Amino acid sequence: MTGTMELRRRMETGGIALGCNVRFSRSPEVGALLAASGMQWIMLDFEHSPASPHLASDIALGALRAGVVPLARPSSHDPREIAGLLTNGALGLIVPHVDTPAQAVAVAAAARFAPRGVLSVPGSLPHFGYALSLAEACARFNEEVMVLAMIESAEALANAPAIAAVPGIDGLFIGASDLLWETGHPGDYGGPVLRDAMHRVARAARDAGKFSGMGGPREEVVWQEAIAAGIRFVMTENDLALLMRGARDRAAFFERCTLAASPR
């Protein structure tokens, strides 16, 4: 089983951590499939996905056993929702709409057991197998859990250095789509607003000794600039987009085959 420490090492040594937003997959095998495709993490999306907590737990535990780190995006900052996700398989959070340092403090505390936070202790913790005692598993969880604050508004962008400085916030993550819509530039992934945000967020994270990530763009040139700026935690796409891209490539290939075989 892998953990977040391996992701941290990849980024600290200049590599990137590749992940996928799991919104539509329904099989616990999706983690193993993505591992075989070169991904290191997945995000279980409770902000936008129709998946049930039961299904998400199965997917998270399957991902852990396959060597992929399961993170979750809660729909809110509610500690009860966060507790349900983290104690049933997720090994970290990508928390939406963290606009202020005070919100960052609250979500960081909600993701850790005492004395480092307020996460309620469950009867068991499945992340690391079942050979550890509950006390040992909770202590290891506090070391492994990864919390990213999503930067999705002008307010959050202005507060990025202060949010990055919060103990227990491990990284900043640009939600490019919401940021662009919120600032009045919907869909302009190649424009100056997102370009400026990439550099500001990467710098704020780096100055605090943290890492930075992003999701939303599909344009390769945008990603090339993001990685050059220091973005290391990369949400490649969501599972539906990857499936449709592969399906379109296959359909186009067979269309070309048909045209080539047609009588002249």
Image (cartoon, rainbow, N blue to C red):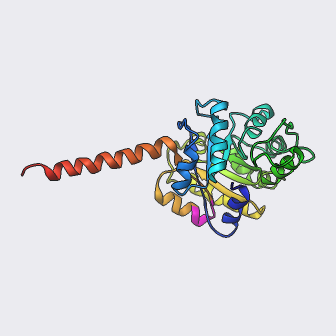
| Farthest residue, direction front | 131
Query: On screen, 248 above or below 47?
Result: below
Tell me where residue 196 sits by quadrant.
bottom right
Q: Which residues are magenta?
A: 227-232
Residue 42 magenta: no
| Farthest residue, direction bottom | 13
Q: What residue lies at 63% left-to-right and 47% top-to-bottom?
A: 63
**Visible in this render: residue 236?**
no
Q: What residue lies at 22% left-to-right and 51% top-to-bottom?
A: 256
Q: Residue 85 at x, y = what percent?
A: 73, 37
| Farthest residue, direction right | 115
Q: Residue 37 at x, y = what percent?
A: 51, 55
The answer to whether residue 81 is left or right of residue 191 is right
Closer to the camera in the image, 90 or 98: 90
Closer to the camera in the image, 159 or 15: 15
The answer to whether residue 43 is left or right of residue 76 is left
**Visible in this render: residue 248?**
yes
Tell me where residue 117 sits by quadrant.
top right
Q: Residue 166 at x, y = what percent?
A: 82, 52
The image quadrant where one finds the N terminus is: bottom right
Q: Residue 115 at x, y = what percent?
A: 93, 46
Q: What residue lies at 53% left-to-right and 38% top-to-bottom?
A: 25
Closer to the camera in the image, 216 or 25: 25
